[in-house]
Image (cartoon, grey):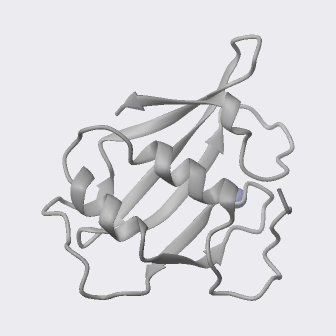
Amino acid sequence: MEHSSASEALPRPLTPHERAILDQLLGGDFPGAAEFRVQAEHVRVVAMCGCGCDSYDVGLTDPDVPRADLPNGPIAQELAVTEPDGTYYGSIILLAHDGVLSCLDFHTWDDRPLSGLPPMEHLSVVPR
Ligand SMILES: [Zn+2]
């Protein structure tokens, strides 16, 4: 994939990698899943973290999408980030605000240098 940087023009469509991670996070059955999956078809990246983690904020391109009736905060599942040797080194959470997807946050438990979102093979869905 193309490496994203904070200096590129925003808003922009999600990259295929960002889209794949979002789709994985929103798979299955959990509170708000149906609404969030509809929203995910109508979002674009509006801000990026510049620290190297490539966490990003999304904004709706269609304000009329259905909203989830949930309190602000993380959705009910997250992605565990694990190296092939089994080292569990971080997680990706997805935050919703006013029932709408707002921010995908990748963080790690150690201070390893980051060069973007982790590869798909490091990710697995876990309940929060
Ligand atoms: Zn960051």
Q: Quadrant of residue 66?
A: bottom left
* Rendered view: 123 above or below 88: below
Q: Position of residue 97 (x, y in %)?
A: 31, 69
Q: Quadrant of residue 63?
A: bottom left
Q: Quadrant of residue 70?
A: bottom left
Q: Position of residue 78 (x, y in %)?
A: 44, 39
Q: Is residue 43 visible?
A: yes
Query: What residue sits 63% from the left and 44% below the top?
Result: 107
Q: Position of residue 9 (x, y in %)?
A: 76, 88
The quarter of the picture where the N terminus appears is: bottom right
* Rendered view: 42 above or below 105: below
Q: Is residue 73 left or right of residue 68?
A: right
Query: What residue sits 25% from the left and 79% below the top?
Result: 65
Query: Farthest residue in the left direction?
Result: 69
Q: Is residue 28 left or right of residue 4?
A: left
Q: Position of residue 85 (x, y in %)?
A: 76, 11
Question: Ligand 1 quadrant?
Answer: bottom right
Query: What residue sits 50% from the left and 74% below the top?
Result: 58
